[in-house]
Image (tube, rainbow, N blue to C red):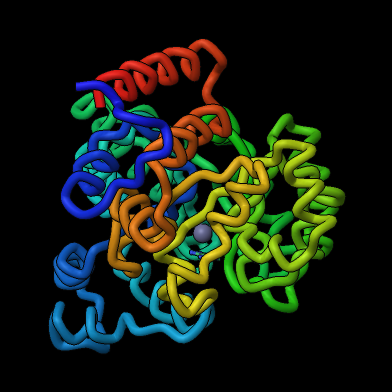
Amino acid sequence: MSGGGASRVLHGASLAAFVQALPKAELHLHIEGSLEPELLFRLASRNGVRLAYADVESLRAAYDFHDLQSFLTLYYQGAAVLREAVDFHELALDYMARAAADTVRHTEIFFDPQTHTGRGLKLETVMEGLLGGLNEGARRYGVSWALIPCFLRDLSEQEAFDTLELLLPWRQHFKALGLDSAERAHPPSKFQRVFARAADHGLPAVAHAGEEGPPSYITEALDLLKVVRIDHGVRAVEDAAVMQRLAREGVPLTVCPLSNLKLKVFSDLRQHSLRQMLRAGLCCTINSDDPAYFGGYVAENYRAIAEAQDLTREDLLQLARNSFTASFLPSERIAAHLAELDAFAAAN
Ligand code: ADE
Ligand code: ZN
């Protein structure tokens, strides 16, 4: 059966099946945000970490956020159960299995070194576990991966410099450096000198900007950090000049609809800015951010936003195409993924 019209809007079960089978890349996933409550409890028990919640159900019930900070507080508490390399290995392998089930062909994964070194873990423990789990996942499921360490923007510039020094011996394992955590009052400009030093080592920059922060943070990330991608960027619609620039320069945005809904960036997915950004020609992609906390992996993010905004089959194909072209993959790998996507489009 062939496509049946470029502008067809899919709904219900046919939409769910289409987005699940759609070949895609995921470009915005915090590995600590893929820590499901079941694994969290298992690791807490194995490592003797006391939790403030009696069971999985009461922990899940606490996942009721009113903004980014209310989420981050629980998210950093949750990460404290990760203590040994084998914990990071299991975490990464579990995510790779879920990604493969959503027909993710390639994934670019954030992790927060300071969340772990700040409580006494060695970077080596984190790296050994993540690399082991990702490599095992790649072998088992045929999903390729890239790693992007992020600086926590609510910590100081000096702490970011110290973290960069720790990361440099592992440089070969990273495709870029990122910036995340509490955005308000922590503008990209705070880290201009750190990202300049990273660029001396050939590391491209990406940054969370325009999630809760204003559109001017997107401009700062582009001008001062020289980012090649903006993470979230959904508040760009508040500034026409920023929208025009993102379109003109073809800057990719890693949009995470369910995250924005759970963190109350938008009160309803029908109010989300994705459709407006797509129609303005921006290079948007769809991602899951912290799926264990926000209630859906990447296919569910495609499904929920498509259902809420009446996205067409062609929109969904474009979003998947963007996910490959905006990745750090070499051009021949991108071309191979786009060929698979074209074959999928012809057959579905
Ligand atoms: N760290 C994990 N998820 C994040 C998000 N959505 N924004 C900023 N920092 C994060
Ligand atoms: Zn994020």
In the rendered image of this protein, does residue 51 appear above or below residue 225?
Answer: below
- Looking at the image, which is closer to me, 179 or 309? 309
Residue 215 appearing in the image: yes
In the rendered image of this protein, does residue 20 appear above or below residue 328?
Answer: below
x, y percent for residue 287: 43, 50
- Looking at the image, which is closer to me, 102 or 115? 102
Give the quadrant of residue 327.
top right
Q: Tell me if 254 is positioned left or right of 288 in this view.
A: right
Q: Quadrant of the N terminus?
A: top left
x, y percent for residue 264: 49, 79
x, y percent for residue 233: 64, 58
Q: Tell me if 232 is positioned left or right of 147 in this view.
A: right
- Looking at the image, which is closer to me, 20 or 43? 20
Q: Tell me if 74 is positioned left or right of 111 in this view.
A: left
Give the quadrant of residue 20.
top left
Residue found at x 74% / y 46%: 246
Q: Tell me if 31 is positioned left or right of 98 in this view.
A: right
Residue found at x 55% / y 28%: 325
Residue 84 appearing in the image: no
